[in-house]
Image (tube, rainbow, N blue to C red):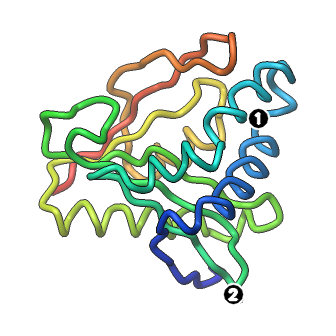
Amino acid sequence: MADSIQLEKLSADDAGALSAISRETFFAAFYHLNNADDMEAYAANAFNIDTLKDEINTPGSVFYFARFDREVVGFIKLNTGNAQHEFKRENSLEVERLYVLAKYQGRQIGQQLLTFAFEQAHALSCRFIWLGVWEHNVNAIRLYERLGFEHCGSHSFMLGNDQQTDLLMRKVLR
């Protein structure tokens, strides 16, 4: 049974809370699979409050917190237009980040966040929705495949000094 979530659009004032949950969820998901120094180097830049304020204020990018029983349990970042990392000239929507706290995984919160992303893409008349996922994140890849995403390429992702590969997956919207 899915726990119903409420979504809250973020402003730059939320960057501190976003930094905290970004770090917590990213480390819970990937720390045991990567070099500690690379994780710390990546987090120091990517989850820096000033960096996140800049991302929140970037035209075409929007963050939402997922709340359950008033607690922030996850978040999603959506990009359109030039804010996207790939397919900038396409009429598409990128799911750049989607994370749920470990203790709330298995409650379909991630799926609800993706459903919200689909709704946003439809509202914007996007042709497709896409994302990048680490090639070793098998559980996420399976979820995306179950939801109709297909592999459409790859790109490099720098985690500290470690060059990794993200699979690009997209779902054509009808």
Please indicate whether residue 129 sits to the left or right of residue 100 in the image: left
- Residue 134 in percent (x, y) is at 58, 28
Q: Nearer the viewer, mark 1 or mark 2?
A: 2
- Residue assigned mark 2: 70
Rendered view: 31 above or below 101: above
Please indicate whether residue 164 sits to the left or right of residue 145 in the image: right
Residue 147's tag is none
Q: Amino acid at mark 1?
A: Phe
SS at mark 2 in the image: loop
Rendered view: 91 above or below 122: above
- Depth order, front residue of 2/101: 101
The residue located at (54%, 20%) in the rendering is 157
The residue located at (61%, 68%) in the rendering is 108
- Depth order, front residue of 159/112: 159
- Residue assigned mark 1: 30
| Of callouts 1 and 2, the N-terminal one | 1
Give the CA separation, mark 1 to mark 2: 26 Å
- Depth order, front residue of 85/141: 85
The residue located at (59%, 18%) in the rendering is 158
Q: Amino acid at mark 2?
A: Arg
Q: Quadrant of residue 88?
A: top left
- Residue 83 in percent (x, y) is at 30, 41
Quadrant of the image for the C terminus? bottom left
Please indicate whether residue 154 sits to the left or right of residue 3 in the image: left
